[in-house]
């Protein structure tokens, strides 16, 4: 019997009270991470793979999470951080090595709703 590895995460759905700003922020960081070619969206939503973003309302309040995106290099982590700042994000940790384990290179931003968004390059796995 063979098994195929599958991600435990099926999708991520964020809801924003600052949707216009959040769409610009996520478009900028996805472009910096080289993932913008598969991005879809409209005036009131954004989708990239298993990531969805739309507006918060009384029935679905804004999200409060930590979300880490995989980067393919230190340069992508740096581009993520710069693009996110330019698109209205708030610095929550500049690009650099972290103490989590050797080779953990990451940067952190707060999106327009205060979610902690990370880009991480793991030099141990390349």
Image (cartoon, grey):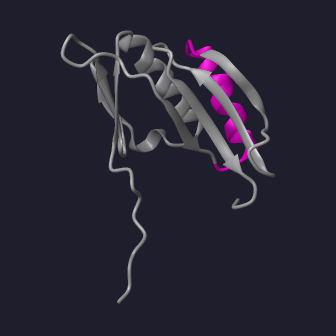
User: Which quarter of the figure has residue 47?
Assistant: top left
User: Residue at point 43% right, 18% down?
Assistant: 22
List x then y, in percent, for residue 117.
55, 29
Is residue 88 located in the magenta-colored stretch of the structure?
yes
Residue placed furthest toward the bottom: 1
The N terminus lies in which quarter of the figure? bottom left
Residue closest to the eye, 64 or 44:
64
Residue closest to the eye, 124 or 61:
61
User: Which quarter of the figure has residue 116?
Assistant: top right
Is residue 84 located in the magenta-colored stretch of the structure?
yes
Left or right: residue 86 compared with residue 101: left
User: Which quarter of the figure has residue 109?
Assistant: top right
List x then y, in percent, for residue 90.
62, 14
User: Residue at point 41% right, 58% down?
Assistant: 7
Seen in the picture, residue 80 relative to 97 is either above or below; the reply is above
Residue segment shown in magenta: 72-89
List x then y, in percent, for residue 80.
63, 31
Residue closest to the eye, 48 or 115:
115
List x then y, in percent, for residue 111.
52, 19
User: Residue at point 33% right, 50% down?
Assistant: 10
User: Residue at point 39% right, 64% down?
Assistant: 6
Secondary structure predominantly adopted by residues drawn in magenta? helix
Seen in the picture, residue 85 relative to 73 is either above or below; the reply is above
């Amino acid at each position: 019997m063979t098994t195929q590895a599958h991600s435990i995460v099926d999708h991520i759905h964020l809801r924003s009270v600052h949707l216009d700003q959040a769409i610009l922020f996520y478009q900028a960081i996805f472009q910096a991470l080289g993932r913008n070619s598969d991005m879809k969206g409209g005036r009131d939503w954004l989708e990239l793979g298993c990531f969805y973003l739309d507006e918060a309302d009384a029935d679905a309040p804004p999200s409060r999470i930590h979300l880490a995106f995989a980067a393919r290099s230190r340069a992508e982590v740096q581009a993520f951080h710069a693009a996110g700042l330019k698109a209205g994000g708030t610095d929550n940790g500049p690009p650099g090595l972290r103490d989590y384990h050797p080779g953990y290179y990451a940067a952190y931003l707060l999106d327009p709703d205060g979610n902690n968004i990370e880009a991480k390059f793991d030099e141990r796995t390349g």
